[in-house]
Image (tube, rainbow, N blue to C red):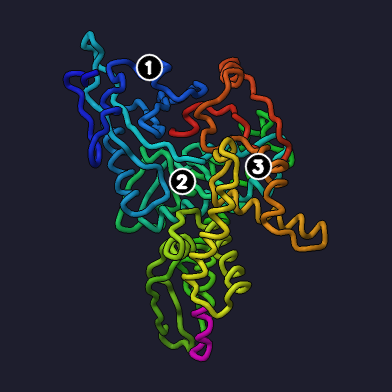
């Protein structure tokens, strides 16, 4: 199929032929099923569909030409800065039907594997601590974006995707349509983003409560305030001053260690002495997220989430202590990867490998082994724990690599009828093939 006359695609790098071959001459709502990744269709201010592109999945959103161009460029800049956000593929303009009628431009982004829209994290028996972890992840995302000078303008759970991260969540920006990048944000810009976030999060939680997705004990307004508190605490820790006396230099190392624990590196810091005061002030000047991620990547080549990296680094330290306490850390990391991590993941049945990311599988397995060891009063090995973990835990997860990409026909029918899908799991981290429409993924 040759591209339609007048069609314009702007993309970084080479434009895949499969992208050109998509039916851009048709309204997105009328695209044939053979090019789409099956998704429930819901109401949204934009029409969004998912399509296969080679061996991956892309999201396509019909919007205005100005919005498509702005969001594409904004996402490209955010990706260059290393921001946690979806990756842009292309902006498509000049679309017309075969009869010459104009069609809306489109923004194309890459689907983030193993990511969940916020409603997919909830079920009827959700515990408050799960909600707390989700809200903390959203707050950390806001802090990271604000440190980069990004003013969001439309902060909400709906404009965010979440990936599991060793018992916590990592949040990613999805919709940058209203975003702006500045050299540095003013206090007023940050405060306005916080106000928008507080209102939107409270409203989204109220909607979930009305639908029976959140426990009645959850207070939507208090939770949105909790988001603000989490943000302010993180912002102060990352950018605020620490006062110390000249003989308390250990406080410098303590502050940097706390920042590292939060997942940030301090490349530079400023120490100054205020006038007429007998103490010094320490302020980090450059903070960069991904401290444990980068360290694990350097040691093993594994590209994982921050908390997953922290957990795996702890396992490498334990492996080193057990095998060669005085040996080289890099050698121990290589041996652990070759002798523990890779063989363990290789034993996961092929039909279960889309349940969770490999690093998350390892984290869950380590937790399972610890619980078994505690219950039995002995040290249960990974090899012994793995088969039971697969049968008792892993099989119960839904395939998060394809969640919302290939829902069952029954789920789609339920969605079209406005009925919530059935929930089979009872724990708070279950991920139902859920009632989200495409707008919950990509604005």
Residue 226 shows in this picture: no
Figure quadrant of residue 394? top right
- Which mark sits nearer the N-terminus, 1 or 2? 1
Q: Residue at x 22, y 8 (%)?
A: 99
Looking at the rendered image, the disc whose residue lies closer to the viewer, 1 or 2, is 1
Q: Which residue is mark 1?
A: 31
Give the spatial CA distance, label 1 vs label 2.
28 Å
Dot 1 crowding, Cα within 10 Å, few <14, some 14–19, many 20+: some
The disc placed on residue 440 is none
Front residue of 416/241: it is 416
The disc placed on residue 172 is 2
The disc placed on residue 394 is 3
Would residue 389 be counted in the magenta stretch?
Answer: no
Asked whether the residues under the numbered discs 1 and 3 touch, taking CB atoms below 8 Å apart as contact, a structural biologist would say: no
Q: Residue furthest top?
A: 99
Q: How many marks?
A: 3
Dot 3 crowding, Cα within 10 Å, few <14, some 14–19, many 20+: many
């Amino acid at each position: 199929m040759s591209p339609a006359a007048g069609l314009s695609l702007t993309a970084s790098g080479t434009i895949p032929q499969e992208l050109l071959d998509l039916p851009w001459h048709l309204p997105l709502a009328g695209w044939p099923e053979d090019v789409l990744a099956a998704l429930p269709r819901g109401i949204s201010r934009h029409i969004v569909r998912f399509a296969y592109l080679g061996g991956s999945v892309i999201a396509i959103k019909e919007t205005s030409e100005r919005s498509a161009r702005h969001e594409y460029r904004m996402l490209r800049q955010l990706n260059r800065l290393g921001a946690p956000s979806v990756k842009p593929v292309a902006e498509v303009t000049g679309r017309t039907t075969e009869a010459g009628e104009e069609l809306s431009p489109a923004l194309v982004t890459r689907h983030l594997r193993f990511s969940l829209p916020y409603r997919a994290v909830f079920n009827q028996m959700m515990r408050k601590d799960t909600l707390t972890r989700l809200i903390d992840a959203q707050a950390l995302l806001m802090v990271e974006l604000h440190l980069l000078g990004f003013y969001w303008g439309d902060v909400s759970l709906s404009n965010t995707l979440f990936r599991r991260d060793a018992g916590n969540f990592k949040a990613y920006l999805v919709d940058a349509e209203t975003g702006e990048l500045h050299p540095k944000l003013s206090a007023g810009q940050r405060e306005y983003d916080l106000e928008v976030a507080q209102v939107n999060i409270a409203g989204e939680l109220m909607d979930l409560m009305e639908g029976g997705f959140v426990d009645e004990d959850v207070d939507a307004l208090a939770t949105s305030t909790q988001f603000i508190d989490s943000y302010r605490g993180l912002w102060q820790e990352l950018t605020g001053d620490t006062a110390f006396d000249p003989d308390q230099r250990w406080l410098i190392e303590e502050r940097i260690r706390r920042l590292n624990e939060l997942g940030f590196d301090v490349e530079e810091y400023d120490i100054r002495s205020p006038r007429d005061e007998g103490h010094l002030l320490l302020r980090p000047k450059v903070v960069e997220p991904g401290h444990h991620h980068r360290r694990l990547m350097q040691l093993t080549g594994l590209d994982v989430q921050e908390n997953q990296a922290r957990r795996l680094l702890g396992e490498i330290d334990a492996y080193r202590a057990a095998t060669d306490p005085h040996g080289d850390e890099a050698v121990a990391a290589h041996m652990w990867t070759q002798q523990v991590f890779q063989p363990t993941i290789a034993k996961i049945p092929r039909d279960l490998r889309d349940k969770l990311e490999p690093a998350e599988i390892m984290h869950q397995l380590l937790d399972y082994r610890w619980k078994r060891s505690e219950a039995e009063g002995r040290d249960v090995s990974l090899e012994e724990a793995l088969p039971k973990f697969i049968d008792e835990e892993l099989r119960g997860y839904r395939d998060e690599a394809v969640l919302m990409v290939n829902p069952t026909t029954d789920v789609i029918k339920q969605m079209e009828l406005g009925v919530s899908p059935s929930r089979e799991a009872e724990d708070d981290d279950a991920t139902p093939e859920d009632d989200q429409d495409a707008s919950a993924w990509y604005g």
